[in-house]
Image (cartoon, coloured by chain):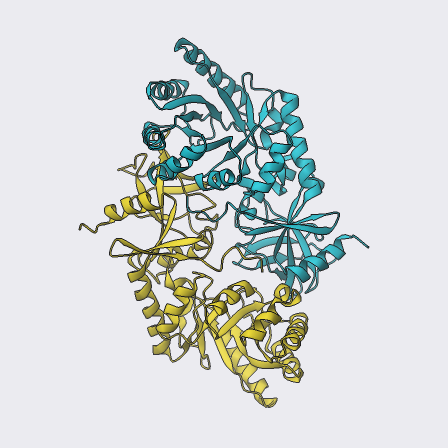
Chain colours: A yellow, B cyan
Amino acid sequence: MNRDSSTLKSAIIENFGTPCAVIDLDVVERNIKRAQTLCDNAGVKNRPHIKTHKSPLLAKMQIAAGAQGITCQKLGEAEVMANNGINDIVIATNLIGAARSGRLAVLQKRVPLKVCSDNLFSLTAYSNAAREADRPLDVMIECDTGQKRAGVETPREALALARVIKEDPILNFAGILFYPSQDSWPQTQIFLDEMVKGLSYLGYQPGIVSTGGTPNFSNIGKLLGATEHRAGTCIFNDRMMIEDGFATQENCAFSVYSSVVSRSGTERGILDAGSKTLTSDTGGLQGFGLILEYPDAQIHKFAEEHGFLDLSECANKPTVGDIVRIIPNHVCVAVNMFDKLVAVRDNQIVEVIPVEARGLLV
Amino acid sequence: MNRDSSTLKSAIIENFGTPCAVIDLDVVERNIKRAQTLCDNAGVKNRPHIKTHKSPLLAKMQIAAGAQGITCQKLGEAEVMANNGINDIVIATNLIGAARSGRLAVLQKRVPLKVCSDNLFSLTAYSNAAREADRPLDVMIECDTGQKRAGVETPREALALARVIKEDPILNFAGILFYPSQDSWPQTQIFLDEMVKGLSYLGYQPGIVSTGGTPNFSNIGKLLGATEHRAGTCIFNDRMMIEDGFATQENCAFSVYSSVVSRSGTERGILDAGSKTLTSDTGGLQGFGLILEYPDAQIHKFAEEHGFLDLSECANKPTVGDIVRIIPNHVCVAVNMFDKLVAVRDNQIVEVIPVEARGLLV
């Protein structure tokens, strides 16, 4: 059998139509192994962020390859993972909505979670949830070292929260969570050192010291005292990671197969993949995705179900009916648009993997 | 019982958590009635675009209020609607992926559809699908009058396609589909007049002449010969429609309830609604959504599950734990992020409506 990419394209359109989200499992496995090796070599545990794939099956592949556990960004993601037998879960955000709805308590009763906080309000909500669950809850302090995301901005604030956790009868102080920018590693070290010193005065251990981000694999091992790294994108990679230098096209496991559905006008065309397929998230790049067959074509605008192609730079232009593969700018948000991923190996369809933890309210 | 918005907020967070997608059914009903009246007064049929809500229940409310049928943008949407008994469906795009996968034929066998084309490739695919279904298929010609979307750019091309349809033994020429910009109404009239004249030389009737878009309600009735209008957004409205002048805040039926989860830094804050909730689609506006309680707060950036608030212009700043209601810039893409909508009336939860036609591949 001729297992080439055009045979696969025919199989995809005949079995599923377009647009279709496809992952290459051979590339996925290599990417999982690469992230694990990078963590192993740096002496930190690997706790992949499953927000990228939202699939218990893929999370289990990461754990089988050596990951300590997983990171989630929503309680709904953690629920789906726990329902599939995964029980070492960090939820890397202030879970206020989930705590107040009672769903945190319900899950905590079943699986001991590690949650994050940067304020007294979420600590109170966690304490209530832990009492409702009747099980001590591990809490990490989220710290910010310049990204201006969530996270306390000073070690002093972080220590104050650590004390509150320690004094709460049902909360455990479990560690420190950072998401440093690629160039804020030195500030992060200063923050961590002060924090560890402060904790030691109080007689506390730092616990888990977690860093995050696929781009930060370039810094892995640099933060002395770090114990874990959580990266999401690296399981699939995307155009942002190519631009970043972390990945090449060959490392990109996810693509959207799309048909050219219109070619009105000589210098333009329309794809059947729009903002409801690839999302309007540019990731700071020009255009919305890289078309592997026509790298000089630019997806310059979206309607909801249409991608607008500027073909003026293409010597060889696509025709209506052509199927193209698009590497999205930001894979995490693109995966989130699909209920299922078609998994292939060696240009053959092998499986359909549900994106189980998507579309959830909380 | 005290039915105010703060009671409703408590009920939302206790029953569902945040972020939560909420629609006010009283406003929905008024919006449906308004669109119907605008069409009735202009003497055109109303064929609402269900891409906005993707819910058979809401589509049936539109039909009960007088709509002729519905418009879909994907075959998957049409499948879900047909499964719920809706049988007058226009799919307003070249359905190449769906035709080649055989799914168009399967649906056409069950429900006679009206599909659209702007090229010979999709006409051939439609002809094959109709033969497979063993049922004649209605085809409309999609025409472009300046938006540079899909659609042939000249009446001559449109007429050539109409002839191909007429000569095909199993395709029916069913009409002409436009999506004029708000200021291209005069060109659209010229296009339509030439088209009708050409069709008449060939002995054909124009059939359905369809215009589209909620903003184009301001032009409804202006295109002589138009028979139908398809508008999506008007069932919910959004910040774009407020900016456009079509809607006020009181006409906005959909909002996302979100918790303030972090207030690190004096002039900033973090919401638990990010690009996976509201999407990165700005609709050309500044910031991502209007916060009803803090209209001077700007959602200036997104992470996947976080909205970044700039509070520098807010005299009165939100605190952690506050629940806010956000009108998205573009409601059609925001609804598409949720599996269900919580429906309320008079500040009480009355129903949970599944967004049935979302997340589908084709």
Residue B168, position in %: x, y?
A: 33, 21
In the rendered image, the quadrant that contains the N terminus of chain B is bottom right
Residue extending furthest right?
Answer: B1
- Confirm whether residue B249 shows in the render: no
Residue A194, position in %: x, y?
A: 55, 82
**Number of residue marks:** 0
Left/right placement of residue B39 relative to residue A247 reads: right
Residue B10, position in %: x, y?
A: 72, 60
In the rendered image, the quadrant that contains the C terminus of chain B is top left
- Residue at (58, 38) in percent of width and height: B59
Between A242 and A95, the residue placed more toward the observer is: A95
Give residue A137's quadrant in the image.
bottom right
- Confirm whether residue A221 shows in the render: yes
Left/right placement of residue A64 relative to residue A357 reads: left
Residue extending furthest left?
Answer: A1
Between B118 and A130, the residue placed more toward the observer is: A130
Left/right placement of residue A133 relative to residue A19 reads: right
Between A148 and A4, the residue placed more toward the observer is: A4
Above or below, comparing residue B201 to residue A181 in the picture: above
- Residue at (45, 50) in percent of width and height: A282
Above or below, comparing residue A70 to residue B3 in the picture: below
Above or below, comparing residue A63 to residue B164 in the picture: below
Give residue A36's quadrant in the image.
bottom left
Residue A125, position in %: x, y?
A: 66, 71
